[in-house]
Image: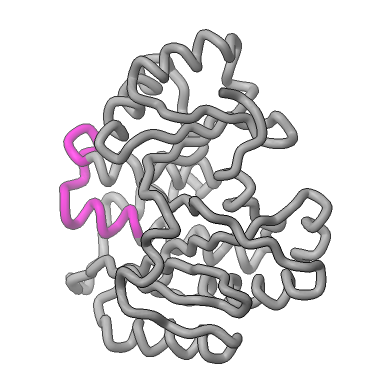
Amino acid sequence: MAGHSKWSNIKRKKGANDAKKSKIFTKLVKEIGIASEQGGSDPAFNPRLRLAIQNAKGANVPKDSILRAINNPTKDQKEYNEVTYEGYGAHGVAIMVVCMTEKITRTVASVRAIFTKHGGRLEKNGAITFLFDHKGCFTVAATDVQNEDELILTLIDAGAEVIESDDEAVALHITCAVEDFGRVQKKLEQLGKVPNYAGLDYIPNTLVELSDELLPKLMKLIDALEEDDDVQKVYHNISIGTDQEHLLG
């Protein structure tokens, strides 16, 4: 089951600069605050908070920032809602945008404007979901894996469907059904494996290949969406080859 990972290919990101990292940190800390406010500040009894803390640690968010977010959740007491928008970029690229917002009218207007500015269009919900599979996903650093074959067999027993290494063999990417997410997460905890990332994601089942000329233009749309304060995650079905990574900036 190990080999080239389609999931890691889709989620491959260009190296983030300081401004990009700051934006990522802000979104991770925001999720911790919302999770703490809505489900309590004890990670042992709040799975969403436990997951948010885990992802923040995996992204190297400072410990002090994590603790502040847990102990001082969103003081404005605004009611945040998670909403998902679907659309197409140019050349048939499918894009799903997951947002966390307290004002949906502002968010949908912003997301629509970004699509339009970059030659895309927002669609009705359900228009492109058939192009993605909703899955539980984990990333474990290869340095944390002593016996890969044994780990694979153990995780399969726990419900893992696909376990793949990335091109550079620096991480294992684990995919499971949404309903098995908790079982796989618990098994990793029992094994003492702390994922660099864990979450429920949309994985494309059909990929779109773009020329070297078109890829940077589409990535400008992806980047613009990710930079919006209300946007938490962006998924797309662009196939990015290792020989195209230099085009991502």
Pick the front one: 174 or 226 = 174
Residue 151 in the image, given as x and y percentages of width and height? 50, 14
Residue 192 in the image, given as x and y percentages of width and height? 43, 18
Left or right, 169 with reference to 71: right
Quarter of the image where one finds residue 98:
bottom left
* Image quarter in which the C terminus is found: bottom right
**In the image, residue 223 lies in the stretch drawn in magenta:** no
Residue at left offset 50%, top offset 17%:
152
* Image quarter in which the N terminus is found: top right
Residue 52 in the image, given as x and y percentages of width and height? 36, 47
Quarter of the image where one finds residue 218:
bottom right
Residue at left offset 49%, top offset 61%:
235
Pick the front one: 6 or 26 = 6
Magenta residues, start to end: 31-46
Residue 101 in the image, given as x and y percentages of width and height? 30, 74
Residue at left offset 26%, top offset 51%:
71
Pick the front one: 170 or 155 = 155
- The answer to whether 203 is drawn above or below residue 141 in the figure is below
Quarter of the image where one finds residue 102:
bottom left
How many numbered marks does the figure carry? 0
**In the image, residue 36 lies in the stretch drawn in magenta:** yes
Dominant secondary structure of the magenta stretch? helix
Left or right, 61 with reference to 6: left
Residue at left offset 61%, top offset 65%:
20
Left or right, 2 with reference to 230: right
Pick the front one: 193 or 128 = 128
| Colour option used | one colour
